[in-house]
Image (tube, rainbow, N blue to C red):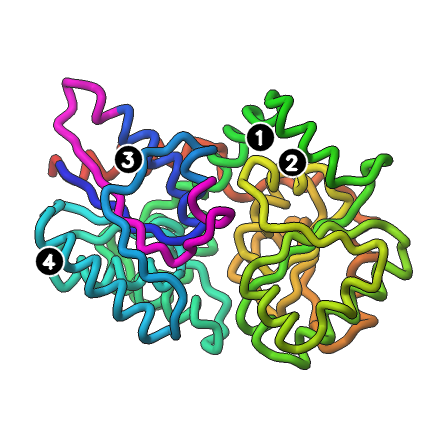
Amino acid sequence: MKIGIVLGTRPEIIKLSPIIRELGELKNNSTKDIDYFLIHTNQHYSKYLDEIFFKELNLPKPKYNLNVGSASQGKQTGKMLEGVEEVLINERPEMVIVQGDTNSTLAGALASSKLKIKVVHIEAGLRSYDRSMPEEINRVLTDHISDYLFPPTENAKENLIREGIKKNIFVVGNTIVDATLQNIKIVESKKEIIEDILKVIPENKEYFLLTLHRAENTDNKERLNNIINGILKISEYYNIPIIFPIHPRTLKKLREYNLLNKLGSDKNIKTIEPTGYFKFLILEKNAKLIITDSGGVQEEACILKTPCITLRENTERPETLEVGSNMLVKVEDVESIIGAVDSMMNRSRDWINPFGDGNSGETIVNILLEKYKN
C-alpha cells in the first residue's frame, strides 16, 4: 500500500509526526508491503516555521516541495491544488492523509477526492461554528469529502454525525498528545536547548507566554490594537515578563499599524523570533500562563498543565473549556482580558487531559492497514 501525506504548516508537521514515524517503522519492516511519501506545500516556508521542525523531530525530508508560500486564500489554495494533483497523478497512492484545517488540508483532500483516491482526515469533526474563520470552511469541506475520519474526541464525532457523516468514523484521541509526551522527554534531556532557553526567560523563571497569529486578530487594526492594550495592561498589573515569539504575519501587521513601538516601550515584554518546536515546548511547560489565539497551543497547554487564555470568542477545542484548562476572552474588552488572567491564575491545574493516551498515531495506522486489507 502506498500512502501520500500532505502537509504545509508547523502544526501539521508536529501532529503528523507520530503517524510518519509509525509508517517509517513499518516501511523498514520487510514483512510489510507499505510505502509513503510527503508532499510539503510550503504554506509555512520560513526556517523557524518549517525547516527546523523536520530536523528536530527527526523526520524524512518531503519528497515533494510545492513552494507555494504566502498568497490570498483563493490563489494559495489554487496553487496547492494544482501542485498536489500533479504529484498524485504520478504517484497514484491508495490513500492520502491530511490533517486539521489549513488550505493545505483542503487542497490535499480535494485533489485526492477528484482523483478517486481515498482521503484520510486526521483531527476530523472539530467545529467552532464560526463561518467567518477560513479554517472552519476548510475543516467542514474536508470532512465531507473524506473516506476515513479520525476525530480526537466524542464531541468531535457527534459533530460529524449531526452533519450526516456516519461511516468510517474512529475516535482515536489527538496525535498532539503523542508528539507532546514523546518530545518533552527528549527536549528536557538536551542540555544545549535548556541553556538556550535560560537566555530568554527571567532568573526567577516566572513569565507569561504570548502567541498571536490568526488573521481575524492580526489583520484588523482595531482588534490588534485592543490586544496590545490588553497585553500592556497585564504587564502593568502583574509586573511579570511576557515572552512573545512573533509570527511573521503578526510582525508585518504590527509594523503596518505602527503598533510595534507601542509594544516595545514596555520593558516587561520580550519579543523574540519564532522558536523551534523543542524550545517552544519548554516555554509552554514552564510558563505561569499562556495567552494565545492558536488552536494547537490550547491543546498543548492542556496536556502540559499550563493555564491558557484564548483571544477568541469561540474555539473548536471545547474540551479545554470543559476541563478548565482554557478560557475564552473577547479582545474588544481590555478589562475582560485582565479578569480572565486573574481567573486562570487562581485555578487548579489538576484537570484531566481529554485528548487521549498518546498512542493515537499507532492506532490510526493500524486501522488504515486493516481497512486496506478489507
Inspect this view and state whether residue 62 appears.
Answer: yes
Q: Nearer the viewer, residue 265 or 19?
A: 265
Q: Residue at x 74, y 36 (%)?
A: 199
Q: Earlier in the sequence, mark 2 or mark 1?
A: 1
Q: Residue at x 85, y 56 (%)?
A: 267
**Residue 116 shows which numbered tag?**
4
Q: Earlier in the sequence, mark 3 or mark 1?
A: 1
Q: Earlier in the sequence, mark 2 or mark 3?
A: 2
Q: Whole-Å distance between the Cαs marked 4 and 3?
A: 21 Å
Disc 4 vs disc 3: Cβ atoms closer than 8 Å?
A: no
Number of residues whose C-alpha sits closer than 10 Å to that of mark 2, classed few (under 14), some (14–19) or many (20 or more): some
Q: Earlier in the sequence, mark 2 or mark 4?
A: 4
**Residue 282 shows which numbered tag?**
2
Number of residues whose C-alpha sits closer than 10 Å to that of mark 1, classed few (under 14), some (14–19) or many (20 or more): some
Q: Which residue is mark 3?
A: 365
| Amino acid bearing label 1 | Ile
Q: Secondary structure at mark 3?
A: helix
Assess whether residue 71 is covered by the magenta stretch: no
Inspect this view and state whether residue 324 appears.
Answer: no
- Compared across the picture, whether 344 is left or right of 132 comes to right
Q: Residue furthest bottom?
A: 222
